[in-house]
Amino acid sequence: MCFFLSTGILIRLRRSPELYKSEPHRIRTCNLLIKSQLHLAKLLNKTSVSELAELSNLSKAYISQVKHGKRPPSQKLLDALTELATPRKPRLDYITLFLQSRQARGVSPKTLEFYKERLNKFAFRVNYLNASPQNIQRYLNSIPPNQNGFATGHASFRAMQAFYRWLNAEHGLNNPMTNLTAPIVGKPILPSLTQGQVLMLIEKANCVRDKAIIALFAESGLRLSEVTNMRICDIDW
């Protein structure tokens, strides 16, 4: 039997010399297995713990122990390494196709750049074709808020949602964002005028009406539309 002893690429063969002489085909089989395991051992050393953990769904602590030769690799880890080592056929670049579809619909260059930036950042961190709702939620949670609350995360959510809806409609792929809720956009607190600034504005006003309007804004906090729609009958004299 052939197996890894450590990632120092040390392999033992638990076979007796007599068995090799009587069954030479086993030597050829084991030699092929050795070459395969040597390749996997090199790949194990080369690949980061985080990447292997995500690929195999094994703990980082266990993978770290395997990489340092303290524990043998499980079959699950070997399968993950084999999958990683298997050449993959080129797949469609769905993001480029999506951008082309938006361009054909006449969206502005600024909107195209918005989609491109958000989706490429997402694709760099998450395998979007195999992403689960949990993967997407973790990605959105990792986006730090800017001065407008969660506006950055909300923008990414909108771009990703449009992309997955297009994937589902045009290519029949699953939409993992169906039941996800968009991040809440925080309301920015705008700077206010000091009392001295308000008095200066009132002083600079050209007429009594304008002075009264400025004073009303400052004292009541009314919106512009509320002041313009105000009638004499609305005032409690």
Image (spheres, helix red, strand yellow):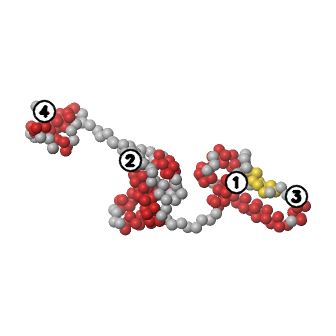
Residue 236's disc number: 4
Q: In front here: 66 or 197? A: 66
Mark in front: 1 vs 3: 1
Mark in front: 4 vs 1: 4
Mark in front: 2 vs 1: 1
* 10 Å crowding of disc 4: few (<14), some (14-19), many (20+): few
Q: Could you tell me residue 35's position as x and y percent?
A: 74, 62
Give the secondary structure at mark 4. loop
How far apart are labels 4 and 2 at the CA level? 41 Å
Ranked by sequence position, the earlier of labels 1 and 3 is: 3
Give the secondary structure at mark 2. helix
Give the secondary structure at mark 3. loop
Q: In front here: 188 or 175? A: 175
Residue 151's disc number: 2
Which residue is disc 3 drawn over? 16
How far apart are labels 1 and 3 at the CA level? 25 Å
The residue lying at 63 percent from left, 49 percent from top is 58
Quick check: can you spot residue 111? yes
Residue 75's disc number: 1
Q: Is residue 222 above or below residue 46?
A: above
Q: Is residue 135 above or below residue 82?
A: above
